Amino acid sequence: MAMEGTVQSIEVSADAQTIYEVALDLDAYPEWATGVKEVEIESEDDYGRPLRVSFVADAMIKEISYTLLYRYDLDSGFSWSAEPGTDINAMEGSYQFNELEEGGTEVLYALKVEPAFTVPGFLRRQAEKQIVSNALRGLKKRAENT
């Protein structure tokens, strides 16, 4: 089944490395990432980066649980996909960090979600947009105050 996705960007007054480190500090997500209630890092790679991580989040409609598998295949960011589960059939996402010539960094966040429960398409798209927007604002605030 084809999934539509959401892509948004924001400029952050911090270098790409700082933002990358904030974005990978998954244990801290409940402190600043709207809706994230619990995070459990189940495995890491040889560099200490998360590989398999379970989340519990308030998805507005209901509390959901999901597990993400992280990939570090991007030159300037990382991506993830969800294991199919009770609440999520599919989820793909990525962060890309592009340093700007005038200083700061453009953060690009892409996300597409297919929940395992029935949600009208317009509500799913609206929730997806809100998740991305809130995540970018939270990441910006956290990185600029680091």
Image (cartoon, grey):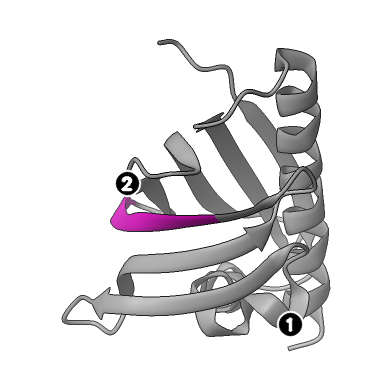
In the rendered image, the vertical position of residue 91 relative to residue 104, given as above or below: above
Horizontal side of 77 relative to 8 (left or right) equals left
In the rendered image, the vertical position of residue 102 relative to residue 109, given as above or below: below
x and y percent of residue 21 in the render?
Answer: 52, 78
Q: Quadrant of residue 40?
A: bottom left
Quadrant that contains the C terminus: bottom right
- Whether 78 is among the magenta residues is no
Whether residue 25 appears in this view of the structure is no
- Residue name at image x 39 percent, y 57 percent: 67
Horizontal side of 99 relative to 145 (left or right) equals left
Horizontal side of 42 relative to 61 (left or right) equals left
- Residue name at image x 53 percent, y 51 percent: 95
Q: Amino acid at mark 2?
A: Glu
Q: In the image shown, does 13 or 111 lie closer to the viewer?
A: 111
Q: Quadrant of residue 32?
A: bottom right
Secondary structure, mark 2, is loop
x and y percent of residue 142 in the render?
Answer: 76, 78
| Residue under label 2 | 83
| Residue under label 1 | 31
**Residues rendered magenta in the picture:** 65-74
- Residue name at image x 54 percent, y 33 percent: 113
Dominant secondary structure of the residues highlighted in magenta in the image: strand
Quadrant that contains the N terminus: top left
Disc 1 to disc 2, how far (Cα)? 24 Å
- Whether 72 is among the magenta residues is yes
x and y percent of residue 3 in the render?
Answer: 50, 17
Q: Amino acid at mark 1?
A: Glu
Horizontal side of 119 relative to 110 (left or right) equals right
